[in-house]
Image (tube, grey):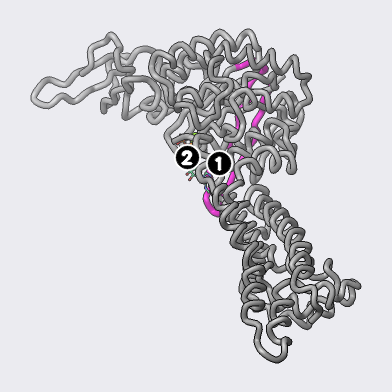
């Protein structure tokens, strides 16, 4: 059963259409990564899933139940905000335990949960501080901790590692990777980091201008991009594009790549008839075959 | 003029000012919170109408207000005068709190909603603890306005519920024979003292930047 299903969701702010018919369905326990250029609507989609912004049309299902008009609290979701959103008047300890307190978890269990996530995120020594006394990276870890202290149906992470130093980021990435099967919770995760996307995801959704361009496994999105945008967007360094002409060559086809001042390069088309891609061929950078 | 001086009226003023300041500040805080963090269709219009209240000259509403107080059975009572001050104060306190809460990131409220907190819980636990600077502003402003009010005091109070400003005027205008400038001056000083004290005491707690560190940057 799909743990999270987004069905033809649209979101408009006045006349600005930010989400245009977004449909996604992921299974329970899957790790979905949203990638896309800045301003394409990733955070807006997260807010729609969380119930913080009402959608203009469409439906959202969590665990098979239609939650489109449910309040955020009823959806049982924990979220890490792109801007952290730590409660300024509370200590780190209270920031982490607030959600549990609101859900009437007994004090002893709350304390245990705080200790557990503080250990995991290496913030045990910061528990009595206020957010204003922390560096950006530490605040980000507290924001992570606040979400991880709870055991919701779905986690939403909006660029949770963007402010960490390279080493800590790798450590945290490993922690999340190890944590995910243990928790078994469905995760939706926004990132601009290619490595994060390729290593963490069960499933990647590439967005542009409020559309989902491609939804598939990291392998699929990387090796079999649906269009030039996805092809160019995924991968670091990004893919090279070479203009070529497709022509008949004996029984099969060949690609003619114009090379000024030299004899044109003629590459045999791999197998089967070409479809959909005539006019431009793409190959991943770092491919072992020689570039023209 | 009775001979016990302005003392009784001084306490009258406190009995009017303190509840009026507290109620108008509390209502203004809730209004500002609802108008910024729980926007609804037409919330901008509601705010615009409240702003309008800041520009209405007091004299214009004296007669309708007297009528309303009569209907409510509050004429010449302390409660009636408090009500008048609260109604007028809300326009200003709402403006203060609304402008303050606009600057507090909405994500804080979003995070609290996801954590399962409701309308009042979010106000009480998340927003109120960072509102000290604007509470001080609101209290100083309201205290000064209501303490120094003469017009409503003279229009809507009976002899025994008069605030000190009205009593001061009576003292100065009704004494006969040689003017007792020393007594007049002393009464004026006494009448001015509480506002001064509020400025000196509350000014100390005028702390800024309490929300620093809650969001990125
Ligand atoms: N409350 C709002 N009112 C009007 N427009 C909005 C609002 N919130 C977001 N937008 C618009 O929606 C678009 C998508 O914003 P969103 O924050 O979802 O982008 P994003 O994909 O998360 O970008 P980034 O990677 O920079 O975080 C932007 O063009 C933004 O201007
Ligand atoms: Mg974003």
For the record, the magenta segment spans A3-30
| Labels 2 and 1: the sequence-earlier one | 1
User: Whole-percent x and y of residue B196?
Assistant: 59, 61
User: Whole-percent x and y of residue A189?
Assistant: 54, 24
Residue drawn 63% across the image and 64% down it: B193
Q: Secondary structure at mark 1?
A: strand
The residue tagged 1 is A20
Q: Secondary structure at mark 2?
A: loop
User: Whole-percent x and y of residue A120?
Assistant: 56, 11
Please report, as a chain letter, where disc 1 is located.
A
**Screen quadrant of the N terminus of chain B:** bottom right
Looking at the image, residue A153 sits to the left or right of residue A191; the answer is right
Residue A209's label in the rendered image is 2
Dot 1 crowding, Cα within 10 Å, few <14, some 14–19, many 20+ = some
Magenta region includes residue A27: yes
Residue drawn 75% across the image and 32% down it: A74
Circles 2 and 1: CB atoms closer than 8 Å: yes
Quarter-of-image position of residue B61: bottom right
Residue drawn 75% across the image and 79% down it: B154
Please report, as a chain letter, where disc 2 is located.
A
The image shows residue B39, relative to residue A65, as above or below, that is below
- Whether residue A82 is visible here, answered yes or no, is no
Residue drawn 71% across the image and 30% down it: A61
User: Whole-percent x and y of residue B156?
Assistant: 80, 77
The main secondary structure of the magenta stretch is strand
């Amino acid at each position: 059963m799909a743990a999270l299903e987004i069905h033809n969701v649209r979101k408009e702010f006045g006349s600005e259409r930010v989400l245009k018919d977004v449909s996604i369905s992921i299974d329970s326990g899957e790790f979905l990564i949203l990638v896309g250029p800045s301003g394409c609507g990733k955070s807006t989609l997260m807010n729609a899933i969380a119930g913080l912004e009402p959608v203009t049309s469409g439906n959202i299902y969590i665990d098979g139940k239609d939650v489109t008009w449910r309040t955020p609290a009823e959806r049982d979701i924990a979220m890490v905000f792109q801007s952290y959103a730590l409660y300024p008047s509370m200590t780190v300890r209270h920031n982490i335990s607030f959600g549990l307190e609101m859900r009437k978890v007994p004090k002893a269990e709350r304390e245990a949960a705080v200790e557990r996530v503080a250990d995991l995120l290496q913030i045990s020594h910061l528990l009595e501080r206020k957010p204003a006394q922390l560096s950006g990276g530490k605040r980000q870890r507290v924001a992570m901790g606040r979400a991880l202290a709870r055991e919701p149906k779905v986690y939403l992470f909006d660029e949770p590692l963007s402010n960490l130093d390279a080493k800590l980021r790798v450590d945290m990435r490993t922690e999340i990777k190890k944590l995910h099967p243990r928790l078994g919770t469905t995760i939706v995760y926004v990132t601009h980091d290619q490595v994060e996307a390729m290593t963490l995801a069960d499933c990647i959704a590439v967005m542009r201008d409020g559309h989902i361009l491609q939804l598939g496994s990291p392998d699929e999105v990387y090796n079999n991009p649906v269009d030039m945008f996805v092809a160019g967007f995924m991968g670091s360094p990004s893919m090279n594009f070479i203009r070529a002409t497709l022509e008949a060559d004996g029984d099969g086809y060949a690609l003619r790549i114009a090379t000024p001042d030299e004899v044109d390069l003629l590459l045999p088309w791999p197998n089967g008839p070409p479809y959909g891609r005539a006019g431009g061929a793409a190959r991943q950078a770092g491919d072992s075959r020689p570039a023209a | 003029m009775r001979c016990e001086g302005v003392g009784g009226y001084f306490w009258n003023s406190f009995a009017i000012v303190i509840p009026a300041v507290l109620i108008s500040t509390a209502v203004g805080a809730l209004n500002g919170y609802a108008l910024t963090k729980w926007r609804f269709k037409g919330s901008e219009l509601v705010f615009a109408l409240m702003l309008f209240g800041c520009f209405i000259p007091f004299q214009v509403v004296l007669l309708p207000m007297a009528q309303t107080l009569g209907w409510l059975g509050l004429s010449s009572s302390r409660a009636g005068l408090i009500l008048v001050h609260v109604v007028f104060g809300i326009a200003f306190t709402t403006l203060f709190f609304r402008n303050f809460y606009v600057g507090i990131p909405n994500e804080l409220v979003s995070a609290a909603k996801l954590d399962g907190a409701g309308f009042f819980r979010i106000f009480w636990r998340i927003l109120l603890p960072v509102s000290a600077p604007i509470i001080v502003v609101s209290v100083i402003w309201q205290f000064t306005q209501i303490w120094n009010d003469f017009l409503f005091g003279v229009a809507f109070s009976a002899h025994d519920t008069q605030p000190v400003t009205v009593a001061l005027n009576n003292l100065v205008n009704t004494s006969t024979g040689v003017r007792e400038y020393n007594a007049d001056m002393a009464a004026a000083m006494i009448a001015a003292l509480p506002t001064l004290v509020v400025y000196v005491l509350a000014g100390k707690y005028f702390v800024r930047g309490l929300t620093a560190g809650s969001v990125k940057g």
